[in-house]
Amino acid sequence: MSAPQHPTEPAGPVSEATSGAVLSPVPADVGVPAQPDLPDPDADGADATVEPVDVAGDEDDDGADDLLVREGDVAGDYLERLLDILDVDGDIDLDVEGDRASVAIVGGELADLVGTDGAVLEALQELTRLAVAQATGVRSRLMLDISGFRARRRADLTSLAAETARRVASSGQPERLSAMNPFERKVVHDVIAGVADVHSESEGEEPNRRVVVLPDR
């Protein structure tokens, strides 16, 4: 998720670009089961022998990678228990993408775990992050996907951002996109950063924070 950015008010008229379905804020009454108790962290789970190296930075990288793998393992155990409680079939895939752990639930009938506009998915991601933080003692930025919802949303937002950037570069007029969650805003910012003659900023407060695409002056 992107680092918070100070909103700035673009000069001149600003048009509104629609982004299709946007994840709604998680409703307070989302029916997510109570978090099961997690086992205490396994003190023997990180005892792999590490050969000494000359560069201290390599040791730091190894430690960060080990933590991300540990996050994925804890998240996988937590979600397996949750699926058992809900009596829902699904396979759990673990990965590390960049600087965060990535967990995906695939297979089975999982639409109820995604919810309308991904609302239940967002709630489950927060619960999973809390479970990971409880086990590791470190705040988690883990990403959870279910049935490819985020992957499809990423593709849609990539197309939207590229098209908006082309319009702004051509017209010289800024455009505001619909309100998005942090994951969606980061996708848009990453796309805009790769387009010449335009840049992007975020404005507003959650849950109505949005991306503004502006021409370079």
Image (cartoon, rainbow, N blue to C red):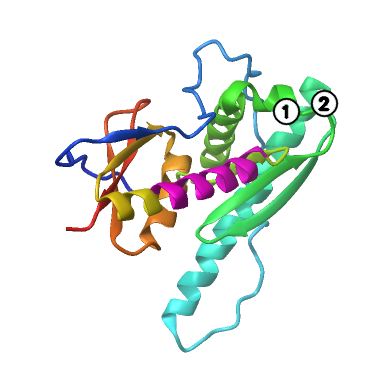
Task: Identify residue for label 1.
Answer: 82
Q: Amino acid at mark 1?
A: Leu
- Residue at 63% across, 61% down: 46
Q: Does residue 55 show up magenta in the picture?
A: no
Task: Identify residue for label 2.
Answer: 88
**Furthest-left residue in this view:** 11
Above/below status of 59 relative to 157: below
Task: Give the mark nearest the N terminus, 1 or 2.
Answer: 1
- Which element carries disc 2, helix, strand or loop? loop
Which residues are the magenta region?
Answer: 149-164
Q: Is residue 21 visible?
A: yes
Q: Disc 1 or disc 2, which is closer to the eye?
A: 2
Which image quarter is the C terminus in? bottom left
**Furthest-bottom residue in this view:** 54
- Residue at 54% across, 29% down: 21
- Residue 147 rendering spot, x and y as whole percentages: 73, 38
Characterize the local packing of mark 1: few (<14), some (14-19) or many (20 or more) Cα atoms within 10 angstroms: some
For the residue pair 134 and 10, the one nearer the viewer reads as 10
For the residue pair 169 and 84, the one nearer the viewer reads as 169
- Residue 72 rendering spot, x and y as whole percentages: 64, 50
Marks 1 and 2, how far apart at CA: 9 Å
Predominant SS of the magenta segment: helix
Give left or right: position of 11 versus 179.
Answer: left
- Residue 120 rendering spot, x and y as whole percentages: 61, 24
- Residue at 50% across, 15% down: 27
For the residue pair 89 and 133, the one nearer the viewer reads as 89
